[in-house]
Image (cartoon, rainbow, N blue to C red):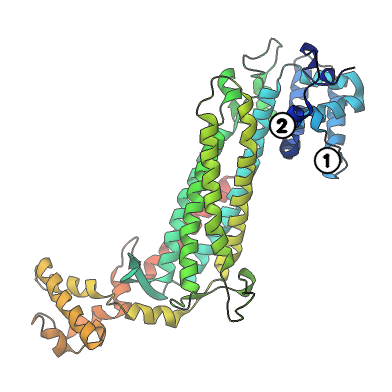
Amino acid sequence: MSQATNQSWGGRFSEPTDAFVARFTASVTFDQRLAGQDIQGSIAHATMLARVGVLSDEERDAIIDGLTEIRGEIERGEFEWSVPLEDVHMNIEARLTQKIGITGKKLHTGRSRNDQVATDIRLFMRDAIDSIDSELSRLREGMIGLAEREADTIMPGFTHLQTAQPVTFGHHLLAWQEMLARDHERLLDTRKRVNVMPLGAAALAGTTYPIDRHVTAELLGFDRPAENSLDAVSDRDFAIEFTSFASILLMHLSRMSEELVLWTSAQFDFIDLPDRFCTGSSIMPQKKNPDVPELVRGKTGRVYGHLMSLLTLMKSQPLAYNKDNQEDKEPLFDAVDTVLDCLKAFADMVPAIEPKKESMLEAARRGFSTATDLADYLVRKGVAFRDAHEIVGQSVAFGLKEKKDLSEMTLEELKQFSDTIEADVFEVLTLEGSVAARNHIGGTAPDQVRAAASRALEALKAHREAK
């Protein structure tokens, strides 16, 4: 028997596939990762085929028992993967036929590898999204808890990386949390479009067998079967949407990483990361490097690359399935792994951040961070804003010359710029007074920070209860 006839499609060919081409076109080295989902889909397919009378109950049971045994072999590392059999689907089907005979060949009735792999990927993506959902929830919960604990810890807020106004560390952490909350919404929204079943679309046009796709969808936990067979087997927009989510998430984690790297530097000295999240230098014994946030920042580029890879892969494909789509799995798998690893690192690390409160407070005292408060004070006293802006600018220039913050100036020094300034000005020039004055939803006041943290935790709790 020729090598070609050993293939599931070999009957049409008169010579074996070239050895290099066989290796070049095979996907089993990476798509074997879909084995669990492939077996899950096959069990549901066999169950449906028996229900509509295409398979007998005995054939169904033999197939399910055989697949269950194969799953055990794979989990124990006993399964022998074959490159000539091309992919995860044919490897499992060939082993099933070895175990139960010709009945194993009946499993493929009413389906194609086209709808089979599309289904496997969606099952994989659904599992991956659920795992990411859990890690993202864990990170957000830890971040919110730290924000609540540090609701009173004053630090400088920045624009252009220049001291702008005082905020609290808790308020800053809740800004991170808001980014992640939007990412979480994007993830859950993506899951809705992932959870649609292609199985039954067959190669591209459906099948002549009397299948019941609603039964299979229910068995596999899909919301519904795909409406169009051509689209069901050929598009990977759900994978692109996931990598788009992943890119935005990693962009946010990268921004957080950048701040963590800055804050751990001697120049900022705002926080300390536990040693278990850092490494040392091979030559400089004093170094403690923030490798975890640096690496997360670096991995962002690789996820961006996966998004571009999948967009480019899909952009010129005619309907329906094309071999190009074999290239969807490796970037998708790596994007999933990278997201999960980065989230796990952050979920473990963020609650362990130790703020250096005195350093933060001292930094907030520098840079005239209460200048806006002085301008607001003058406006409340009846001074036009543009005039108030100029008065404060003159006050800051004086402070730079005398090396004094606004709160360190005497009343007489301040009054030389405006007679409107009275002794009550010092209530707004203190850092504590500045953050407390912004006492509205979304503001920096410690009570508002604690209230915002409480709302965020309630939203997370509601999400978990809804799952």
Residue 462 drawn above or below residue 32: below
Q: Is residue 209 above or below residue 198?
A: above
Q: Which residue is mark 1?
A: 74
Residue type marked 1: Ile
Q: On the rendered image, what quadrant is the C terminus found in? A: top right
* For residue 92, side relative to residue 343 (left or right): right
Name the residue at 44% across, 68% down: 170
Tell me, yes or no, if residue 284 can be seen here: yes
Q: Position of residue 403 (x, y in %)?
A: 26, 87
* Mark 2: amino acid: Phe
**Image coordinates for residue 363, horizontal then vertical, percent:** 37, 79
Residue plotted at (68% across, 13% down): 207
Residue occupying image coordinates x 9% and y 79%: 420
For residue 24, the mark is 2
Residue density around tag 2, few if under 14, some if 14–19, many if 20 or more, within 10 Å: few
Q: Report helix, strand or loop for mark 1.
A: helix
Q: CA distance from mark 2 to mark 1?
A: 24 Å
Q: Nearer the viewer, residue 33 or 318?
A: 318
Q: Which mark is residue 439?
A: none
Q: Pointer 2 and pointer 1: residues touching (CB < 8 Å)?
A: no
